[in-house]
Structures are given as C-alpha cells and as structure tokens.
Image (cartoon, grey):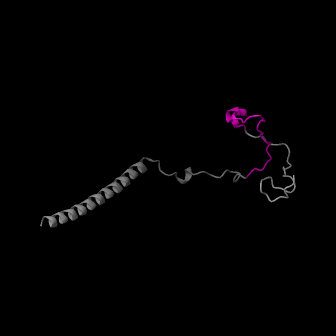
Amino acid sequence: MNIAWTDIAAEGALGIGLIVVGLAVVALLIGAFVLGARIRRREPPPPRPEEQPQVPEDGPVREVQENREPADVPRSDRRLTPHELPAHGNVPSRSSPSKRRRRWAEGGSGSFGSGGSGRT
C-alpha cells in the first residue's frame, strides 16, 4: 500500500507543480502588460494633424544632380589611419564647376569582373 500512496502523491505533486508553473506564467504575462501600459502612459501622445510636417509653399523638394570634385586620399608609403586624414576624414566634397559627367574607360564598367575584354 505504501507504493500506491507514493505513486498517487507523485502524480498529485506533478499536477500541483504544473498548476504553479502555469500561474507563474500568467502572472508574468499580466505583469508585462501592466508595465507596458505604465510606460505607454508616460510617453508623449501622437502628434495632432496640425503638428505633422507640411510640404513647403513652393512644392516638394526635388533631387539635385550635380558633379562633385573628388576628395582624394593623400598618397603615402604606409597605411594612413583615420586621424591622419585631413579633418579626420570628414571633409565634405565641393561642387565641381564642370558640368561634364565623368565616364569610365571604353570596354569596362570600372569594376572587377565587369565582363570587359580584359585588356588595359
């Protein structure tokens, strides 16, 4: 009889353990929902229609196409680190007075494996 009571007690403990784990998961989910609601309440409300960005009076901004002068990296016998570049590598490029677009050499696209003739 002792063995039967042990089996029943083990099954009962397993059932109670599953119920406790289930309640813990439900409590965690409810806690996450409450925490999310508190955080949401502290956030500013969404902008009203009059606060939304407006199109400028003269219409939408268009893309500007212009040629830029190249900003070449200075030549050196050793590898340069970013702090050795002019203005630490963040010098803006300038507009080029030339309106002629630069083209690649005939027979290639300017990249490796471009399918060109292979002659230089």
Corner quadrant of residue 71? top right
**Nearer to the camera, 72 or 78:** 78
Is residue 25 toward the left or the right of residue 14 in the image?
Answer: right
**Nearer to the camera, 58 or 114:** 114
Q: Tell me where residue 33 appears, x and y as whole percent.
A: 37, 55
Corner quadrant of residue 23? bottom left
Q: Secondary structure of the magenta portion, mostly?
A: loop
- Report the residue at 77% width, 56% height from top: 113
Is residue 56 toward the left or the right of residue 66 in the image?
Answer: left
Asked if residue 100 lies in the magenta stretch, the reply is: no
Q: Tell me where residue 95 appears, x and y as whole percent.
A: 79, 42
- Report the residue at 79% width, 57% height from top: 114
16 w.r.t. 67: above or below = below
Q: Tell me where residue 98 appears, x and y as whole percent.
A: 86, 45
**Nearer to the camera, 59 or 107:** 107
Is residue 84 toward the left or the right of residue 102 in the image?
Answer: left
Task: Give the residues drawn in magenta, as a range.
Answer: 63-91
Is residue 46 toward the left or the right of residue 33 in the image?
Answer: right
